[in-house]
Amino acid sequence: MGQKLKQYILSLQTVLESGEEIQDIGSLKAELFTEISFWQHERLIHLLVTILFAILTMSVFMVLLFCQELSVLILLAALMSLMIPYIRHYYILENGVQTLYTFYEELTKRQGNIPVSCVPALTGVKIRSVKQ
């Protein structure tokens, strides 16, 4: 999954950094929006699995404190060895989705219109441009 996300990010980055004008920016934004929703779902599932493994690992650690047996220690070692890849994979998903957000914002900026739904509806707040 992580490799697929990296390839998609590289393809979008190539399109955006080419300097050429994008012919159908609306359909590209729609496709990117769909991809973002898929990756958000994937990220949520992996977050839940990572949390479950963390709770399970801490539970086994608590059992090890009260019951010093080799089998519990082996189970703890196995769970700890699985936690590292889960955390790494979630980290890749999180950063990839954040990168897709910036690409979507860039496409919105290039399209020249920002949807009204993206502007916060706060009364009495003056919105000023941010210098880049």
Image (cartoon, rainbow, N blue to C red):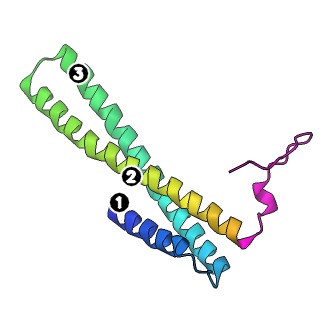
Distance from the alpha carbon under mark 3 to that under mark 1: 34 Å
* N-terminal-most mark, 2 or 3: 3
Q: Give the percent coordinates (x, y) of residue 82.
A: 23, 43
Identify whether 61 is placed above or below 22.
Answer: above
Write down the residue under mark 1.
Answer: 2
Label 2 close to label 3 by CB (< 8 Å): no
Q: Is residue 50 left or right of residue 12?
A: left
Residue 55: quadrant of the picture = top left
Label 3 close to label 1 by CB (< 8 Å): no
Q: Is residue 28 left or right of residue 59?
A: right
Q: Residues within 10 Å of mark 2 (few under 14, many from 20)?
A: some
Q: Amino acid at mark 2?
A: Ile
- Residue 49, which numbered label? none
Distance from the alpha carbon under mark 1 to that under mark 2: 6 Å
In magenta, the rendered stretch is 111-132
Which residue sits at x=20%, y=14%? Answer: 66
Q: Which secondary structure, mark 1? A: helix
Write down the residue under mark 3.
Answer: 63
Distance from the alpha carbon under mark 2 to that under mark 3: 32 Å
* N-terminal-most mark, 3 or 1: 1
Write down the residue under mark 2.
Answer: 92
Q: Give the percent coordinates (x, y) of residue 40.
A: 51, 57
The residue lying furthest to the right in this view is 124
Label 1 close to label 2 by CB (< 8 Å): yes
Q: Residues within 10 Å of mark 1 (few under 14, many from 20)?
A: some
Q: Give the percent coordinates (x, y) of residue 80.
A: 22, 35
* N-terminal-most mark, 1 or 2: 1
Identify whether 56 is placed above or below 2.
Answer: above
Q: Is residue 33 left or right of residue 108?
A: left
Residue 28: quadrant of the picture = bottom right
Of residues 61 and 80, the one drawn nearer to the viewer in this rendering: 80
